[in-house]
Amino acid sequence: MKNYNYPDKNGQFGQYGGRVVPPALEEVLKEVEAAYLGLRDDPQFIEELNHLHQTYTGRPNQLYLADSLTKKAGGAKIYLKREDLNHTGAHKINNTLGQALVAKKLGKTKLIAETGAGQHGVAVATVAAKFGMECDIYMGQRDVTNQSMNVYRMKLLGANVISVTTGQKTLKDAIDVALGAFIAEPDTYYMLGSAVGPHPYPMMVRDFQSVIGKEAREQILKAEGKLPDYAVACVGGGSNALGLFTDFIPDEGVKLIAVDPAGKGANTNQHGLALGKGKPGVIHGFECLVLQDDQGEIVESYSAASGLDYPGVGPEFCLLKDLGRVEIVGVTDDEAVKAFQLLSKTEGTIPALESAHAIAYAVELASKLKKDQTIIVNLSGRGDKDVKNVYQNLIKKDQ
């Protein structure tokens, strides 16, 4: 993995990625790509983004040894990378601040975005308020209901929240409608929230999120004197997982575990196992592994965690799977809800339901490892947004 250097100049991660879009959108995306590539290594841009992270995001955040959770698991040490401590409560702000600076470079005054769990929408609305921009957020009607608190936050921040009622009324459909709005309004800036979509978004989002792993590397070396044995993160589109994993990809001694949402179970038709069960196909302007039926039609995904409810996955994860650099595991809704409660009760930290998928697998993994081994889990967001939904709809009556 020492020569790992993706994407290529066409935005390809092996056979995945690229730009499969109408000509009008192709030209707009080339403009975004040129602006980002011109800024990426600019010392002034890097200094401005770092300053924003230090004074606004609250970085660096902690790499926290979860002593009680570790004791409960009875094996390896479990460290939590505390993205939940960021301003807005999730990793999403890392990306939206970076992209806001790109939008400013392009002279844009309005942001368009999609959101599932609402955390990306809140982060976009936040940077729009900070930089004095207009903001339209597209959100599936089902997610609007499940994530009402984040809807209120977005509106309070000045965003226009647009409920999407087509399809399964979730993240996929929100992206469909948001991309349509972007084509209709080319003078706006489309702020994609995960490492998906047409080039340059998978590259750009990964780069902005890679601050997570860069900090975690330095912090674990200081705490343990060595790199972790495992890095674990949930995967919807892949932004929080790539954020943690990217800096460790060359280090083959660090095992990377991607936790796919198994929903009601891998053997049902209600899951989001795009990495585990997807086939190569095109969705939202890029090629990736995507859930399909026997005729090659994209099928509905499902996860109780809105941010993981997506039938595709970022192109870089598809390549990393093909290369054997990541191990793919699945965690069900029930297992994630139990982990949601477990972390809350053992560490006094309520995780996002998305992050709880990673916690669930990390606890199981730790129990099988030696006590001198270490696991870093990306705690990608806090669970305030999920408490009502979990208690009303997901916790079993006998729990």
Image (cartoon, rainbow, N blue to C red):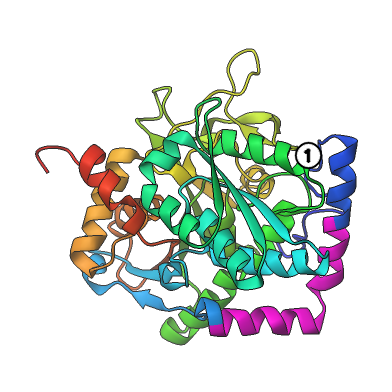
Q: Magenta stretch?
A: 32-55
**Residue 174 x/y as whole percent:** 58, 38
In this rendering, position of residue 148 left or right of residue 339: right
Front-lying residue, 328 or 388: 388
Identify the residue shown where x is 25% and y is 38%: 393
Q: In this view, does 78 lie to the left or right of 99?
A: left
The outermost residue toward the top is 295
Q: Position of residue 156 (x, y in %)?
A: 46, 60
* Above or below, comparing residue 378 to residue 141 in the picture: below
What amino acid is at disc 1? Ala
Q: Is residue 392 above or below residue 325?
A: above
Residue 169, x across and y down, in percent: 50, 31
Tag 1 secondary structure? helix
> Residue at the spot x=39%, y=69% of the render?
80
Neighbours of disc 1 within 10 Å: few (<14), some (14-19), many (20+): few
Q: Assign the N terminus to one quadrant of the image.
A: bottom right
Residue at 37% of width from left, 53% of height from top? 149
User: Looking at the image, can residue 308 be seen?
Assistant: yes
Q: Quadrant of residue 9?
A: bottom right
- Residue 224: % across, % down: 42, 82
Whether residue 105 sits left or right of residue 190 in the image: it is: right
| Residue 373, quarter of picture | bottom left
Task: Please tell me whether the stretch drawn in magenta is mainly helix, strand or loop.
Answer: helix
Q: Does the magenta stretch include residue 76?
A: no
Q: Is residue 271 above or below residue 222?
A: above
**Residue matched to label 1:** 184
- Is 53 magenta? The answer is yes
